[in-house]
Amino acid sequence: MSAISRNRGFTLLEVLIAVILLAILTTALYGSYFAVLRARDRAAEGMEGRRELGSTLDLLRREIDSAMFNRSDKRLRFVVEDRDNFGKPSSNLELTTLTPTSSGLRQESGIIDVQYRIMEKEKKILLTRHEQDLFFDSVTVPAYPQMENISSFLVECYDGSKWVRSWDTTLNYKLPTMVRVTIQVEENGKPVEFRMYAVPKVTAQ
């Protein structure tokens, strides 16, 4: 009888303890699994954000380096407007610049007017870019988000003695000596600034 008693199975208390332990273990495993997935998604978003930031700063550097100005042609311009975006410094940038033509299937002059603007959409701050061929109205790239979810976009111009936040070639009669672009983004809840310098090289008096 003693042998039969020992082999009659688990008690209800033992089953309940086993179920509770299994539930705790499963919860821990699922929590770790989803934590890994969230970390992977954040890393992917961070890599995409850095790629977008790098391509934007590189594009701005190339366009500012190739900025054009000529006093006799009012279509050629370089304008920086100092703006305020919810208490943070911000800029509007418009410039005429040289750009490589595409496949040649359409008429292009290789000289474009580019505008960068800050706008808010769905509680996110976007940096938009608009491109217009200077000589062919049909060659237009509508404004589109160049960068999404940034904190601020600041353009500063060096006039040879100091940095200023406004510039207009119709008033200054020349291109800036150097241009500094600062883009601020949020990383892990903290503001981080990325900066780029460019030197306009194409000037005709």
Image: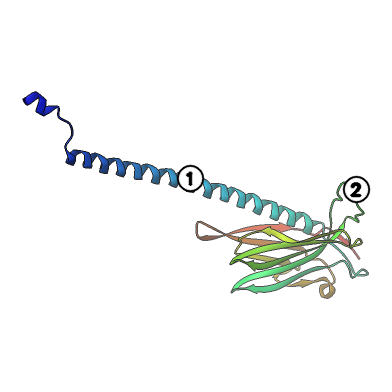
Near-viewer residue (133 or 162): 133
Asked whether, in this view, residue 162 is left or right of residue 107, the answer is left
Judge whether 187 appears above or below 1 on screen: below
**Disc 1 secondary structure class:** helix
Q: How many marks?
A: 2
- Which x, y percent locates residue 171? 82, 75
Amino acid tagged 2: Gly
Quadrant placement of the N terminus:
top left
Q: What is the distance, in whole Å, between disc 2 and disc 1 at their CAs?
A: 45 Å
- Which x, y percent locates residue 38? 48, 48
Local packing at callout 1 (Cα closer than 10 Å; few below 14, some 14-19, many 20+) is few
Q: Quadrant of residue 203?
A: bottom right
The residue shown at (68%, 57%) is: 196
Local packing at callout 2 (Cα closer than 10 Å; few below 14, some 14-19, many 20+) is few
Q: Earlier in the sequence, mark 2 or mark 1?
A: 1
**Disc 2 secondary structure class:** loop
Q: In which quarter of the image is residue 64?
A: bottom right
The residue shown at (90%, 48%) is: 105
Near-viewer residue (15 or 25): 15
Residue wearing tag 1 = 37
Find the residue positioned furthest to the left. 1
The residue shown at (73%, 60%) is: 144
Judge whether 137 appears above or below 81 on screen: above
The residue shown at (67%, 68%) is: 119
Amino acid tagged 1: Leu
Near-viewer residue (8 or 90): 8
Near-viewer residue (79 or 16): 16
- Which x, y percent locates residue 79? 78, 69
Residue wearing tag 2 = 104
